Image (cartoon, grey):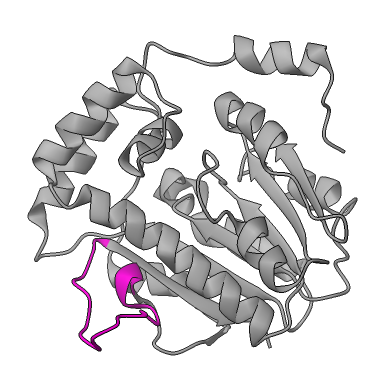
Amino acid sequence: MTDHSPTAAASLRGRINTLQPHTARIWNYWLGGGDYYEVDRVAGDRIRELHPAIDEYARADRLFLGRAVRHLVAEAGVRQFLDVGTGLPTADNTHEVAQRLAPDARVVYVDNDPLVLAHARALLTSTPEGRTDHLDEDLRNVDAILQRAAATLDFTRPVALMLLGVVIFLGDDEDPYGVVRRLLDALPAGSHLVLSHTVVHPAMPDVDAAVQFWNAHGTPRLTQRTPEAVARFFEGLEVLAPGVVSCSRWRAEGADGSEPAEVALYGGVGRKK
């Protein structure tokens, strides 16, 4: 259960580092939020200079989340979500999208950034029929995540595992595919994986420069992977159409029917058989 005590809140505040830019706060800045520090704004602006399309990149990931959750609730009947690497709350968070369609939906958010947790506990509240909880855990701590999430989620029923923009923080030496597989192995048939990941793309060399700048100045460090390497996270799953593609193009809802521009963030949705 989430600890809302003053001691827990003070502990979270004491862990916030305002001297080094942090990915969750910069992401919030790019999405137009206000939960960042000057050091984050400066770094975010520099990354935008190196990769001018970064704002579209951030928005594409958020819109992909919404489209994926709406499909899972309305078409696949999913009512449980395990959202790891939540990020700072903004518009249309996972539980808001899910509970708008199914008020009884249950969502467990997982993050280890103290600012994210402090805001999540204040802002990510549930409908009366459903439930949300927030865990202070690292993606690498698979057993702890599953054990604690079981207080809210029923792992005998399908769960959507949401890993948006978080596996990028696992280096190749940390067995990223094994981490994702261990989480999926704990979920029953009918569960889904929703994953997005920064990619190396020959048509977008400015992304590489932005990543290099980030890894030199920000925290945590991130790892780019090719689109093929991102698709490997879905091995053994039934990958939903249109496959693992630019997040901006996953079941995009363009009014004029044209295909949106690609972003250097690929994602997909896979169903466990």
The C terminus lies in quadrant: bottom right
Magenta-drawn stretch, dominant element (helix, strand or loop): loop
**Range drawn in magenta:** 246-264
Please name the residue shown 57% across and 46% down the image: 86
Nearer to us in this view, 195 or 177: 195
Is 248 a magenta residue? yes
Residue 94 forms part of the magenta stretch: no
Picture coordinates of residue 21 (x, y %)? Answer: 35, 23
Viewer-side residue, 205 vs 117 = 117
Name the one closer to the observer, 1 or 183. Answer: 1
Q: Quadrant of residue 159?
A: bottom right
Q: How many marks?
A: 0
Q: Residue at x 45, y 75 (%)?
A: 268
Taking the spot 41% from the left edge, 36% from the top edge, the residue there is: 33
Residue 258 shown left or right of residue 187 in the figure = left
x, y (%) of residue 17? 47, 14
The quarter holding residue 80 reads: bottom right
Looking at this view, is 173 or 216 the one in front? 216
In the rendered image, residue 62, in percent from the top left (x then y), is placed at: 43, 58
Task: Decide if residue 112 is on the left or right side of residue 239.
Answer: right
Q: Position of residue 224 (x, y in %)?
A: 30, 53
Tell me the residue at 73%/39% (across/down): 135
